[in-house]
Amino acid sequence: MRSLSGVSLAGLFVLLVPAVASAAPDDDDDDDTVIKADEEEPPEAEPDEPEAKPKKKDKNEPFKKQNLTGHDGATSKKSNLFEKDRFFVDKADTEKTEKGTLVQGSLTSTSFLYRESGGTIAPNAAGVPSASEFTRLFTDLRLQTDFRHIGGGKWEARIDARGRFTADPGKNTPNYTPPTNSSSQSGFLGENELELRELWIIRNGKRSDVFFGRQFIADLGGVKFDGLRVDYASSSKFTFVGFGGLYPIRGSRSVTTDYQPLLAQPDAAGNRAEAGRFTGTGGFGAAYRTQNAYGAFGGVAIVPLSSEQPRVFGTATGYYRAGPKLDLYHFALVDVLGSNAVNAGLTNLSAGLNYKPDQRLRATLAFNRVDTETLNVQAQAFLLDPERNINTIQNEAFLIRVAQNQARASLSAGLGSLQRFELTVAGAFRYRGELNLTAPVDATMITPLTVTLPAGKSVEVYGALTDRRSFANLRIGVDGSRIFRVGDASYQRTTVLAMRGFLARELKNGHGEWEAEVAYSSSRDDKAGVVCGLIADCYGAAKSRTLSVGGSLFYRFNRDWFGMGGLYVTRQNLQSFNGMAAQADPAVTGLSGFVRAAYRF
């Protein structure tokens, strides 16, 4: 395992070299690019203006460091054409705000409703409906607010908070009482939520920025933590980043679950020891930005206070423009210590390129790998104790690392006058390795029972054709995909066919757009028609067909109010297999709708 991790680190170093070579710290006097007199293509002069001259370094120009907050901080910027119609755009200072506090933000409300109806399953399950017995309904309210140069000084702050109200399904659905709310609703645990996504204050210095509060370190693996961060700009192109604090439970969506009591992995007897409540984290790295490249790299440690060794990983992300036709990008997260340092430590790896040989043609090529990324002690806080009865399957007792891989390529072409038509073809290969399931040790067993699930592989073929300026000013398009199995088992153990057609049109005043679509999909489980005797044969035994009709509407009421909504009706037919005998369940009709209103200030 150590040698494999070493190979991963070497690969990470190779990814870093091209970008970092041009991003090393430089002297502040050389921050700006100087155009030489013998440049082959000097900048074009403005009409009726003298010929443009090379830009020279102004020794009195103030030092300008990178902004690594993840948000646009240029309050002195001028409005431009590209931001004219954007809703979530940052404000520019006015004479009234530049010497005080610039307050900006948005308030967004989103509500979602879903319900199903269907007949009863017969004959063996008479009285049991084919549809879900509950209605799902929840409302989210999200506030995002920035306080720029508070009191005209060097302090700034940000609040990003979200609340979710989840209705009780038992009150929404006649004659139905759910066993628990979590069995019926979405979210982390299916309950009401109050999430603090960001809550920090920052003091801006000439070279150093100090953050305190809840924040994300986008430059170092997107780590979420509560604590202190310090950025130091050694030049306008190179900034060091360091942080430390407490690490909330990964995936938590509410302050009520951020710091749950933690539990260790079950021992041989199935017992799980307490592991405290808190986990610490810290890291160090650097961010760089040049004329053609930007990115970051560094290392992070996540340290449980009990029952699990620290998790240590290296991370790198970067973008490089090799020329006007080619862009390259990458993201890597390599675990070198801890329970995540399996599967060669490659927890997350993405790399790709965008190629545009001319105005009518675009090509993309990408590879993505994602592994399970969480601590054992945090995951165990929400898993059930192992079930030790013979012939009982309990799939919530243990955490298993499962890596998923995808390679994807696409080609898009603009056809016709003014590229009226757009044709896109794409293909993807998905792979997940074999998985070994080991039963808990039992007194009646000499050796633990182990079951191996075979690797899953699938290929997806996708195509789309869009007429951007059709009759009656409509945008008309069709697309479809086919996912089929490669080898003995398919990725996700299912093959799928999906097709869609849509119509869209901008509203007359240009403030909005409507879109209507009809879609059809069919799926079939790999083991449909096979008796579920062995675990490896119990992936699923059904095939389904789904028809969906619906549409959405987007509308900008004015500069500060925005609304959108959607309504979709689905009809699903499901056929299950018991051995070689097929049984068709009554069709299920589903209704889903959402509405969103946003206000910015």
Image: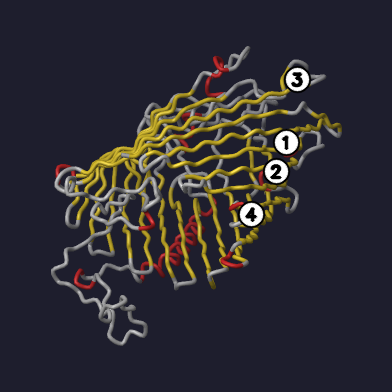
| Left or right: where 472 falls relative to 546 | left
Q: Which residue is mark 3?
A: 120
Which one is earlier in the sequence, the residue at label 2 or at label 3? 3
Mark 4 = which residue? 471
Distance of label 4 from label 2 (alpha carbons): 42 Å
Label 3's element? strand
At horizontal 59% and vertical 48% (from top left) the residue drawn is 504
Residue 282 pos. (x, y %): 32, 46
* Outermost residue, right side: 581
- Residue type at the position of mark 2: Arg
Q: Residues within 10 Å of mark 2 (few under 14, many from 20)?
A: some
The kind of residue on which mark 3 rests is Thr
| Residue 89 point in image, percent of width and height | 35, 48
- Identify the mark nearer the N-term, 4 or 3: 3
Report how far apart the C-alphas of labels 4 and 1 lie in the structure. 45 Å
Left/right of residue 337 with respect to residue 584 in the rendered view: left
Q: Quadrant of the C terminus?
A: top left
The percent position of residue 228, horizontal first and vertical second, equals: 25, 43
